[in-house]
Image: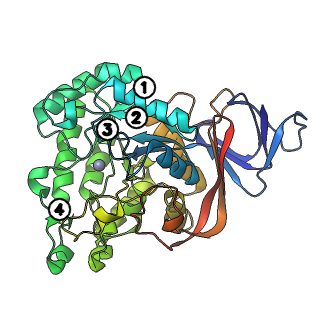
Amino acid sequence: MKLLIANGHLIDPNENQNSGKNLLIEDGKVIAWLGQSESAPEDAEVFDATGLVVAPGFIDLHVHLREPGQEHKETIASGCAAAVAGGFTSVCPMPNTQPINDNAAITRYMIEQAERAGLANVFPVGAITKSSDGAELAEMGEMKAAGAVAVSDDGRPVPTAGIMRRAMEYAKDFDLPVIDHCEDKSLSAGGVMHEGKLSLLLGLKGMPALAEDLDAMRDIILAKETGCAIHIAHISTSGAIEIVRRAKNEGINVTCEVTPHHFTLTDAAVEGYDTNTKMSPPLRSQEHLEAILEAIKDGTIDAIATDHAPHHADEKALEYDRAPFGITGLETAVGLAFNELVHKGVIDLVRFVQLCSTNPAKIFNLKNRGTLRVGAIADVTILDPDFNWTYKVAESKSKSKNSPFDNWNFTGAAVATIVGGKIVYRR
Ligand SMILES: [Zn+2]
């Protein structure tokens, strides 16, 4: 019943903790922090974390688990297996299942499937509008009662300011943040990559940065007006980042997340027409990537989220124009963050834990998570910053293999994942 994580370096930004400490867990909760020479109960199972970083469990605010409806791409069980293998103890699936998660029955079903799998926690995101068709508001109160932690129409962003305003007023009443995929489809429709020099050269229709900037501007103004908490999903443009930065300075209740692919790759990756470089928002140009790194550094960006979007190999095998948007991401996120952010000196380990755990828990109001203080739920991610490994997509726990990072080498990994006091993954 007792688990002692011994000899590790404990990082908990919430508690200003960044030094060696032993962590004692019992019945799924943290019950004590012990000095490393202090004696521990003899009946505790010991996990030796010598040379490792012990952090509150990583929380991915943005995944697509495809169940119900598209189980050939992913199931909640396979998605949760990929999550814990990537170091995530909790994932928040978007509502674009089939049918759409716009009601309490589907929200409840998703949570039950996760409980059956017994791996990661699943906190569903409910739809803003019924069937995410942008017309009639979904029953947010009922979804929240069933366990939904936020609302979003994600890839089918609410088309009009009128509906979005009512949605924000309604969501605020239930204390649910609105997750906003910012894309003005009147500007981006038909586009398959970032609009710029390269899209012209490659002969592919572009999605302008402007489509993201304008929608972010509209919804942040609406958030100011309504007082609703708004969280910008997968931010990817320098313009949207600047808009968020100013809104935060003004005291507007806005947060944002970035994906590992957007802080790693640029539209140059599209040159070989590999459909595993096609996602929405698209990979942007170098100047946008630099703005993203700056915003990760200065705190404008609050969280790292994967936008894990599994697709079957047959669908991704189409021409670039016709292939679906999205890549898998749960098993490469930590490696990419170590390679591109930690080891390049963009951020330190404390900020890394903030981006992957502390802040995500706060943004979605996940009580007793995102921290390892005494009494908190014992969700723990154990990291080895020096672990060298190669990602082999064929060995992925996800049912889908659509990753542009096959055969990439990484230094740094999650080497163990503990959910509710139980070790559910060891590398
Ligand atoms: Zn999206």
The quarter holding residue 335 reads bottom right
Marks 3 and 2, how far apart at CA:
7 Å
Which residue carries the number 1 mark? 147
Which residue appears at 54% of the width and 34% of the height?
A: 116
Which residue carries the number 4 mark? 207
The quarter holding residue 323 reads bottom left
Earlier residue among tags 1 and 3: 3
Residue at far left of view: 186
The yes-or-no answer for disc 2 within 8 Å of ligand 1 is no
Which amino acid, by three-letter code, is at mark 3?
Pro
Q: Quadrant of the C terminus?
A: bottom right
- Give the x, y percent position of residue 380: 64, 42
Which amino acid, by three-letter code, is at mark 1?
Gly
Q: Quadrant of the N terminus?
A: top right
Which residue appears at 68% of the width and 36% of the height?
A: 421
Q: Secondary structure at mark 3?
A: loop
- Give the x, y percent position of residue 285: 28, 70
Labels 3 and 4 touching (C-beta < 8 A): no
Q: Residues within 10 Å of mark 1 (few under 14, many from 20)?
A: some
Which amino acid, by three-letter code, is at mark 2?
Pro
Marks 4 and 2, how far apart at CA:
29 Å
Which residue carries the number 2 mark? 124
Labels 3 and 2 touching (C-beta < 8 A): yes
Labels 1 and 2 touching (C-beta < 8 A): yes
Labels 1 and 4 touching (C-beta < 8 A): no
Residue 95 marker: 3
- Give the x, y percent position of residue 347: 52, 58
Marks 1 and 4, how far apart at CA:
35 Å
Q: Nearer the viewer, residue 260 or 300?
A: 260
Q: Secondary structure at mark 4?
A: strand
The yes-or-no answer for disc 3 within 8 Å of ligand 1 is no
Q: Residues within 10 Å of mark 3 (few under 14, many from 20)?
A: many
